[in-house]
Image (cartoon, helix red, strand yellow):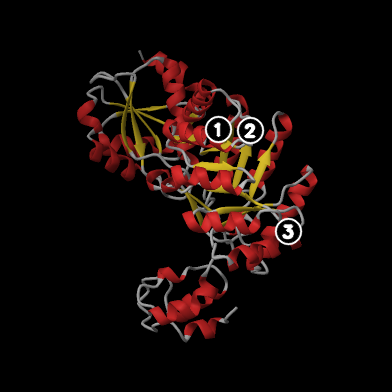
Amino acid sequence: MPTAIEIFKHLPKKNCGECKHPTCLAFAMQLANQKAKLEDCPYVSDAGKQALAASSAPPIRLVKVGTGKATLEMGDETELYRHDKKFFHPVRYSIIVPDTLAENDVVSRVQKANAMRFERVGQIMALDMVCVRNDSKDTARFVATVEKVSSSTELPIILASEDPAAIKAACLRISAKVPLISAATKANLTEMAAVAKEFKCPLVVRESNLNDLADMVAKVKLAGIEDIVLDFAPGTLKELIEKSTVIRKLSVKKTFRGLGYPLLVNAPAGNRGVTMGLISTMKYGSIVVFEELLPQMAIPLFVLRQNIYTDPQVPIQVKPGLYPIGNPTEDSPILFTTNFSLTYFTVLGDIDKSKVPVWLQVVDCEGLSVLTAFAAGKLTSEGVVHDMDRSGARTKSKKNVLIIPGMVARMSPKLAELTGMKIVVGPKESSGLPKMLKSLE
């Protein structure tokens, strides 16, 4: 890998700062440490791009499946641990649709996949892909099932068969949707790579021995395939953890390109499958294909994924503004909280429990919780008044009552002075809101 000085020679040396680094040399140092992308520099020449391609490429290749709004990206990761920076592309979950199912059952299973969506702290958590598997070993039946699935969902599709002829026949029908082909093995490597190249689809390469897997990847690349996903076919949970970690370390720490690709894991039915899904979510999986995934199994997986793939440097936020809760009128009070998503939804739930209509003013505190924002100087009386004026809160409520969080009771005098409103100090914990709001009626 080039050093920072070698990289610096190919940069424009304008020190414009548009890459968000003060100088070209500082940018070169970040590139050398895999902490920046060459695309961040708008002035680097084509010759420079070509010369630096190797150093600026992420240690794990970005692979895309699907088209348009349904496109899924995976890989392009640069860190071994999330707290070093963040993980960029969440693990994707898929269910299997065997081609041995009756047509009605195929449609029913795909409809359940489409409907598997949950909302948590303002974010939608949903199933990502559908995998059509050639269990029948019958090409015509496989193609018919692929067509039925394709017409029943907008989700990206995985074509699962070790028969290159079956994969080719399916690709002839749906290659425009850029499906993921799974999988190339030692027995069919050449033929499967040819199909992937012909239809420009990403290809899964499957082999349990990592040395052999790297050799197979090299052969697939020689055949002209760049978008590769690895399936190391773990036999045990221990093997899943160990090999996932080895591949990630080799890719990120040693920049070993031979295994620098997203990982796919096939999870069996039942609790073991869920356990594999949980481990893959925590340890570097890119796609988990479930034999079955019931909603009660999916929720903990989705929540874990949401937590791991939330940027630790950027709190989850809701949009600041005035929110009517329970059809409030001019006689309803105003209550404020911060725009930290978890705080907002907790307060929202407790207001709902009270059945008391309220105008909820969400104050912009850069996504911090109430006490943290107050301690950091992000939650001030002036800021609350500014946001209330901006949202027109006092034109919507004529009650002239402002309820403030109990933890910031010391803001009362200043808020009373700035607004002329009656300040009511609410409970320290949101759970006390229902009782307090009912007492105001």
Amino acid type, label 3: Val
Most foreground residue, 404 or 183: 183
Quarter of the picture holding the N terminus: bottom right
Q: Is residue 188 left or right of residue 127?
A: right
Q: Position of residue 300 (x, y in %)?
A: 61, 32
- 73 w.r.t. 256: above or below: above
Quarter of the picture holding the C terminus: top left
Mark 3 or mark 1: name the one nearer the start of the chain. 1
Mark 2 or mark 1: name the one nearer the start of the chain. 2
Helix, strand or loop for disc 3: helix
In front: label 3 or label 1: 1
Mark 2 or mark 3: name the one nearer the start of the chain. 2
In front: label 2 or label 3: 2
- Decide if residue 120 is in sight here: no
Q: Residues within 10 Å of mark 3 (few under 14, many from 20)?
A: few
Tell me, for residue 136, which label it has, or none.
2
Amino acid type, label 2: Ser
Helix, strand or loop for disc 1: helix
The Cα–Cα distance between marks 2 and 3, rounded to whole angstroms, is 35 Å
Q: Residues within 10 Å of mark 1 (few under 14, many from 20)?
A: some
Are dots 2 and 1 in contact, CB under 8 Å? yes
Q: Position of residue 350 (x, y in %)?
A: 46, 22
Are dots 2 and 3 in contact, CB under 8 Å? no
Q: Residue at x 74, y 49 (%)?
A: 241
Most foreground residue, 155 or 42: 155
The Cα–Cα distance between marks 3 and 1, rounded to whole angstroms, is 39 Å
Amino acid type, label 1: Arg
Query: On the image, numbered disc 3 is attached to which residue?
Result: 246
Tell me, for residue 381, which label it has, or none.
none
Q: Position of residue 405 (x, y in %)?
A: 44, 32
Query: On the image, numbered disc 1 is attached to which residue?
Result: 141
Q: Residue at x 64, y 34 (%)?
A: 135
